[in-house]
Image (cartoon, coloured by chain):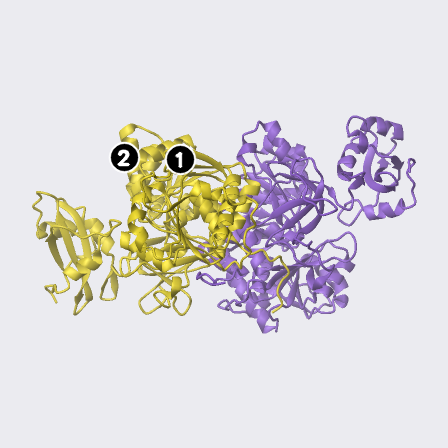
Chain colours: A yellow, B purple
Amino acid sequence: MIHGAMQDWPLLVWKLIDHAAENHGQREVVSWTCEGVVNRSTWASVRQRAKRVASALRAMGIRPGDRVGTLAWNTHRHVECWYGISGMGGVAHTINPRLFEEQIVYIANHAEDRLLFFDLTFVGLIEKLAPHLKTVEQFILLTDRAHMPSDTLLDLVCYEDWISTGHEDEPWTDLPETAPSGLCYTSGTTGNPKGVEYTHRSNVLHAMAACMTDTFEAGARSVIMPIAPMYHANAWSIPYTAAACGAKLVMGGPAFDAPTLQKLIVEEEVDLALAVPTIWLSMMQHLEKTGGHLGKLRRTGVGGSAVPQSMIETYDRLHNVRVVQLWGMTEMSPLGTVGSPIPEVAALPYAEEMAFRIKQGRPLFGVEMCLKDDEGRILPRDGKTFGRLMVRGPWIVARYFKGDGGEILDAEGWFDTGDVATIDPLGYMQIVDRSKDVIKSGGEWISSIDLENVAVGCPGIAEAAVIGLPHPKWDERPLLVLVRKEGAEVSEADVRAYLTGRIAKWWMPDAIEFVDEIPHTATGKIKKVALRERFRDYRLAAA
Amino acid sequence: MIHGAMQDWPLLVWKLIDHAAENHGQREVVSWTCEGVVNRSTWASVRQRAKRVASALRAMGIRPGDRVGTLAWNTHRHVECWYGISGMGGVAHTINPRLFEEQIVYIANHAEDRLLFFDLTFVGLIEKLAPHLKTVEQFILLTDRAHMPSDTLLDLVCYEDWISTGHEDEPWTDLPETAPSGLCYTSGTTGNPKGVEYTHRSNVLHAMAACMTDTFEAGARSVIMPIAPMYHANAWSIPYTAAACGAKLVMGGPAFDAPTLQKLIVEEEVDLALAVPTIWLSMMQHLEKTGGHLGKLRRTGVGGSAVPQSMIETYDRLHNVRVVQLWGMTEMSPLGTVGSPIPEVAALPYAEEMAFRIKQGRPLFGVEMCLKDDEGRILPRDGKTFGRLMVRGPWIVARYFKGDGGEILDAEGWFDTGDVATIDPLGYMQIVDRSKDVIKSGGEWISSIDLENVAVGCPGIAEAAVIGLPHPKWDERPLLVLVRKEGAEVSEADVRAYLTGRIAKWWMPDAIEFVDEIPHTATGKIKKVALRERFRDYRLAAA
């Protein structure tokens, strides 16, 4: 094959920050910091300081391919570290501080992080963990001399002192574009967390796709605030995306409370902000209580879990803010689908359009998507058929870090998201369940989530969980586990009466059990593994 | 170097049409055809028929890497051929039918085109050229059986018959993304045309950049009409871009007249149309004469030559259409810069913003740009300093087809655009001249174009051309060559009086000559080579 004759210009992460510094150098990067002040920086300054980081890392003996950990909020310093580490060929490993301590230790050791950058918030945590972090040679505290703690036994490096030893004319490292650039561990509910190693290529392509009009409509006139943290799938790529399109970047640092976020949104004239539904829920309540507004905010990208219809409607009606659903995974860099309207949907009356807006959206260019059954057959896109959601694309994982979990793509290169979904004829995908939670009843699949959502609406019910139990005839049938509201006296018969007519007949649980408490994971999700364990010997009446 | 672990998903042109067919299958592709009717197609149909093209090409023995020529207007059939050829690994070679006949023959032979697809418009031309096209094995006429000419001696293949022999479930060809996908020759004013061979990678990356919000603001709700022809640097990539973002595509086929274009724009609800300034000039005159309007058109992308300020203002004022300047080259796929406003400029009063809108714009992500002097030193971005405009990026040529012209990048990988430009502190680039035409006077550069533009405003002057002549002290000094309007009696002294105060003192031409006629190229540009030849022995008075 004769190759064409276009320039060899590898897609490297440092080209994003170079582009931003050269073409949008004065555009602001504003952070609420751990020191409790607002820091005003620019893309030019972020590059300059990222170069100092790269230079200082080299001086410390960090080499291309080495992992460098961060335990930090969204701030200009974290962004500088990110670009500085990747820019010298290192792998920026963002660690989620909300994980259990033993998970953090496991992750940092598994990644063999040679350095750890961390925020003031985590001094106490690091004091506890440091003895267990076997590969970390230096702990660098992301603050200035004035804020260095005096009462710690840790041997800490002061970031602002350290960065001043680096050179701002340091060259970036030339790398093949498939070289690793970042590392992020999934918070698996079973087994140890697994690492997803992003490449320069995957990050740059993902940023370009995120800059496409129908993704975020973001450009140089945008002011974007990623409330999703950088350790949560790259803050949904916003620090890359904003650089690629030259947007102003606003970051909340350690703040996730509605009053601080609202203040930043209004004062910095944020027009696009991205966060999980719980953030927007508490913002909604805050605004209702205070009668406040969201300034110039016009769109929110919301992902992480499904968005309730009432939230979409409230933001439309009260705040003139369009809630756009996003769906993705750590394994997908993370963006897979976006709920931007296509003309067929945009033309619908409000109520009919809503039927699409409550879905998770349509795939970006670069993401291929299909539904498969358990035998690997492609399923129809009829909006009804449940199937395993499979994805392919240049920013989707091929294998986990160090080969953990073995071969994870099927014979045709599809990655199984672990989600069960429908895809409608207009291409809108809707998650209906996790594939390990869906109940496989006689060849048809029942969504445990849908069943839980209906059941929790029954008067007197505080929480509901559904698991599948073995059944000789139907393979699996649902068991509904319920927690009563304090003092409520709702009976099984009441629940069955409530469910009748609200769910398909064949979805009716074979058994209903009342318990005092349903177990949860660290992030608040129902721990179905534990439930299944608890009801392991349970026998369904019909079985 | 350990490579990261993201999926290997090569950037191939057929992934654009697959994306469009799968996610925007019902979106329309509308063409005004050579048969004088409007054809209504869809992205799903374009892919289906492109697969038939790929299948039929394979059946004819066309192999990956083979060049297949097209001599055709913008229609659905041309788009099908384009995707079909690239999709089976062939190289789609779009030939400009407006070139001189000997250039077309040279190009087709140099490319070794094995097949030639052509429109009804060109039957007469092909009858003349066929005997000279040494490598073309078959001539395929892009029409149906009913429109096949009966009175030609050519042995023609009827496209609609031929495409029906192909299979619509034909697989695409897997290729490395650096494989060639398309070929387009520059219409060089000196020497033979040189070929630019686009790769799958360069086309896909360019399409992604063109889908970025600040490029065209185009998405699935857009209706885009590329009036720039596909043989003119890929119709500025619109058939790729529209597929990537799922926009409706409207194409004018052989029509370049204002009434037909206006009708299409209004009836098909085009909101973005792209063409050279002359098209928009004649549209402006047409609308003025007829009192017509442009329906839903809101933006025009205008490139190919500088846009007069009066045109920008007229479209703003009378038609509510924003004229956005584009700059690029065949060698750049073609997009280099776009005149979308950044916040600093968008905030200016109208008249001050205009000072930026008359420039050629700012670079897309993926295009690096700098100014160099003759010694290769980087020049300041002060909006004043003239320099050679140099570019780098993944959709910019590294070498011409077959190595014509030898090494074309400098030691740092920059491609010399042949333009002289300024770049201002906000990053807006403005072309001031071609580097072979700029007059190098004592280390400072004088723009021949600017001087011509001022001189042609002098009463009694019909046309003006400026060339540099050797000067012992200043290296070069300008000679102004003028054609008087019929019956005008303007003298050299009149011209000098007119120029005084309108140009910098040191720009005053050393000599002024009146001639009957100024020579032009086929595309209407001043043939400065011929002028320099004519005045080769001319001695400037001061010299």
Q: Is residue B151 above or below residue B424?
A: below
In the depicted view, which residue is nearer to us: A360 or B262?
Answer: A360
In the depicted view, which residue is nearer to us: A39 or B429?
Answer: A39
Quadrant where the C terminus of chain B is found in the figure: top right
- The reply to whether dot 2 and dot 1 touch (C-beta < 8 Å) is no
Q: Chain ID for label 2?
A: A
Which residue type carries mark 1?
Answer: Ala
For residue A279, what is the image quadrant?
Answer: top left
Give the number of the disc on residue A285. 2
Identify the secondary structure beneath mark 1: helix
Crowding at mark 2 (Cα within 10 Å: few <14, some 14-19, many 20+): few
Give coordinates of residue B328: x percent, y percent.
65, 47
In the depicted view, which residue is nearer to us: A523 or A310?
Answer: A523
Alpha carbon distance from label 2 to label 1: 37 Å
B148 horizontally vs B175: left or right: right
Counting residues from the start of the chain, the first of labels 2 and 1 encountered is: 1
Identify the secondary structure beneath mark 2: helix
Q: Chain ID for label 1?
A: A
| Point 86% across, 27% down: residue | B494
Which residue type carries mark 2?
Answer: Gln
Give coordinates of residue A330: x percent, y percent.
37, 54
Q: Which residue in the protein does label 1 denote? A: A146
Give coordinates of residue B366: x percent, y percent.
57, 50
Give coordinates of residue A24: x percent, y percent.
54, 39
